Structures are given as C-alpha cells and as structure tokens.
Amino acid sequence: MINYEGAVFRPPSEARSLIIQATIGCSHNKCSFCSMYKEKQFRARDFSEIEKDLKIARTMYSHIKRIFLADGDALILSTEKLTRILLAIQTIFPECERVGIYATSKSVNIKTNQELDKLKSLGLGIIYLGLESGNDEILCRINKGESASDIVKAGKKAKKSNILVSVTAISGLGGQELKAEHALDTAKALSLMNPDYIGFLSLMVEPDTDMWDELSSGSFKLLTPKEIIEEMIIFLKNIDSPGTVFRSNHASNYFSLYGNLNEDVPSMLEELNEVMKDQDLLKQEFMRRL
Ligand code: SF4
C-alpha cells in the first residue's frame, strides 16, 4: 500500500490522479481560515520514501495519466529535489502526461525562470495557487503571508514557462466589512494574472481555525448567501481575463456557476440576477461542504 501520512488533500480537478506526498503538511500553515494541515509538522519527505511510493503505485495501476504531488505546497522543494522526483516519475510512469502540484507565491518566486522551464520540460504541467483575495488588507487579516502582487507575479512567472496556472479565490473572505474591496481587488489581481483556470470556493469556517475564534468573538461577520451573490456580481462585472476557464461550482458554493472568460460573463450575470430574484435557487446550508 502507498504510505499516506495524515489527511491528504488535492484539487477537485485531480480527483482521478495518483496522489504522491512529496512533502508532509504546509510550510506556511498559518492562514486563519485553513485547517487542512493543522495536525502536521511540515517536512520534506526523503526521496527514497517518495520513490518507494511510486514503485508501489506501479504495482497497483497499469495506466496513470496524471500524478499530483501533495501536500500543501510541495513546490517549495528545491529544484534539484523536484527534478529527481520528476525523473523518477518519467522512469516509473512513462505514460504519465501531467504532474500537478500545490504552490505558493514564495515557492514559485524563489525559482528562476530557467528552473521553472526545466521543471516544465520534465513534466510539471500545472500549479495550483491560492490567491484567496486580491485585497492586501484581507490577505494580511487572514495571515496569508503574501501580498496580491507576490501572487500575481508568481502566476505570471509560471505561465511564462508554459506551466498551466489554476488559481483559487474564496467568496466572502472579506466578510461584511470588506465585501466590495474583496470583489474589486480580486477581479483586478486575476485580470493582471490572466490564469488558465479560476476556481471560486465560498467561505466555510471550521472550528479548529483562528477565523472561527474571530467569528465567535464577533470581529468577523460572514456574508449572507445573498451577499455572496452580490459580491460575485461585482467580481464578474470587473474581471477581464480572456481565455480563462471560470468555475464556481464547488460543494461549498451556494450556487453553481461556470463558463469561459470573458465571453460567458453576460450569461453568468444573467444567472446571478435570476438567483437574486428567487433565492430558493440557492443551495441549502446543510448541503454545503468543503
Ligand atoms: S491555505 Fe494553503 S498556504 Fe495557507 S495554510 Fe492552508 S495550505 Fe498552507
């Protein structure tokens, strides 16, 4: 059996990929809304452990099209180590068409363009980057440890190496206080980055997070489902990212929305205007999940 340590997460689009842990936990692990790796102390796994898992997986699966390297931000590993891992994947799974990985702006920006080119040539096909919000005040409040410009720079840098960039943002992250700022600045940052994919989740606050405490003390106020839709309308009216695949159809979202930017913006806005008129179209709270 493959040796998975603790809970393992992957983006929805990697549901059918082989997951291999290259790191354990997240090197940052401080975002106030995130509980994914709270129980894990960050460490890079030894190459021998990773290679062993790849070899075990080979005995289990006859054809692997995609591999996802977990945990939190496995791109933080050195280029040398990632090169070793990607070469092992090429040897053990020659049929693998794409390797994906979670990244932070730091893990991208510390690498040179040449290093990213090299990783791309060895099979790294997509990075998953969390913008969360394009507003620096919100990024500071959630303890993201990165500015919007850091994240935009990272996305553009990866794209320059022809690595696909999938970016996540979170509806409602600015709370009542910074709703408009969140929508406008997230649209601005994503327009500058022009990623291949944008995925919008809707904020769900879990008990073992700092944000839960802020919610309990009243210092953070969640948006209502209607306000989430209003926020998305502001976002869509301001996004300009031609060619980006837009998805807001995660289990956490109150309303499922998807399309291609910019051409599907008018039809998506129409759908949201319908929801504003008939809120029975919104998902019930008990049906949402992360
Ligand atoms: S949101 Fe991402 S960067 Fe922040 S703690 Fe969670 S895994 Fe780490």
Image (spheres, grey):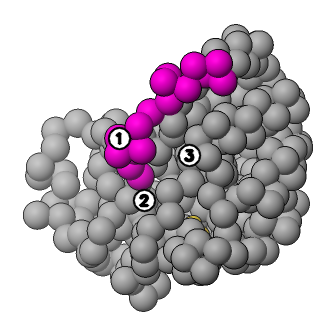
Please report the residue visible at 38 percent of the width from the left and 49 percent of the height from the top: 289
Q: Is residue 104 visible?
A: yes
State the residue position of label 1.
Answer: 287
Residue 49: in magenta span: no
Left or right: 89 as drawn, with respect to 136: left
Q: Which residue is mark 2?
A: 69
Give the mark nearer the N terminus: 1 vs 3: 3
Residue plotted at (33% across, 64% down): 8
N-term mark: 1 or 2: 2
Amino acid at pointer 1: Met
Question: Mark 2, mark 3: which one is toward the viewer?
Answer: 3
Per the image, label 3 sits on a secondary structure element best described as strand
Amino acid, disc 2: Leu
Disc 1, ligand 1: is the CB inside 8 Å? no
- Residues 212 and 148: in front is 212
What residue sits right under mark 3 in the picture?
201
Residue at the location (20% across, 70% down)? 3
